[in-house]
Image (tube, grey):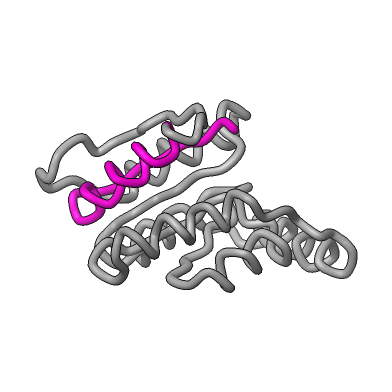
Amino acid sequence: MKLVIGSDHGGFHLKETILAHLREQGHEVHDCGTHSTDSCDYPLIATAAADEIRSGRAELGILICGTGIGIGIAANKIPGIRAALCHDVFSARASRQHNDANVLTLGERVIGAGLALTIVDEFLAGEFEGGRHSRRVGQLRDLEGVYHE
């Protein structure tokens, strides 16, 4: 699977752990940064990852910051991105099955690496169920064009 991964400085160590895990599984992963623990801005990382998904160069993305909240808010501002903050396996599965999430966000300061890897695996294994969920995901897409500043 073609994936994109990114983090700010607060998620750098977990990103590196997940990146190694994904590559060991044979996934093609584009790392859009950051590449150190030096302070950086998560909206820029979220934008770079979203561009990979929107262009079709990546199927799914994983974004990490200290809590997973800020980078997820940034990603969800971008049309076509449905980022889900997941710190448990059930939410990771449901985000794919029911919400057709295309980005997983995680918080390095919230969960340990072992759980994070399990969540990542569950997210990547999930598939959108469609059916009644398609109507709702369509409504989410419609919202992207409704609100303008």
Residue bounds of the magenta highlight: 1-23
Q: Relative to residue 15, is residue 96 depicted above or below?
A: below
Q: Residue furthest right?
A: 131
Residue 26 at x, y = what percent? 51, 29
Residue 44 at x, y = what percent? 32, 42
Residue 96 at x, y = what percent? 66, 59
Q: Nearer the viewer, residue 93 or 115?
A: 115
Q: Say if the magenta span includes residue 15.
A: yes
- Residue found at x 29% / y 45%: 17
Q: Residue furthest left?
A: 38
- Residue found at x 53% / y 58%: 83
In the displayed structure image, the side of residue 90 where residue 111 appears, left or right: left
Q: Say if the magenta span includes residue 12.
A: yes
Q: Relative to residue 69, is residue 124 depicted above or below?
A: above
- Residue found at x 20% / y 56%: 10
- Say which quadrant the N terminus sits in: top right
Q: Quadrant of residue 37?
A: top left
Residue 103 at x, y = what percent? 53, 51
Q: Relative to residue 42, is residue 5 depicted above or below?
A: above
Q: Quadrant of residue 66?
A: bottom left
- Residue found at x 48% / y 72%: 88
Q: Majority secondary structure of the magenta segment?
A: helix
Q: Nearer the viewer, residue 146 or 62?
A: 62
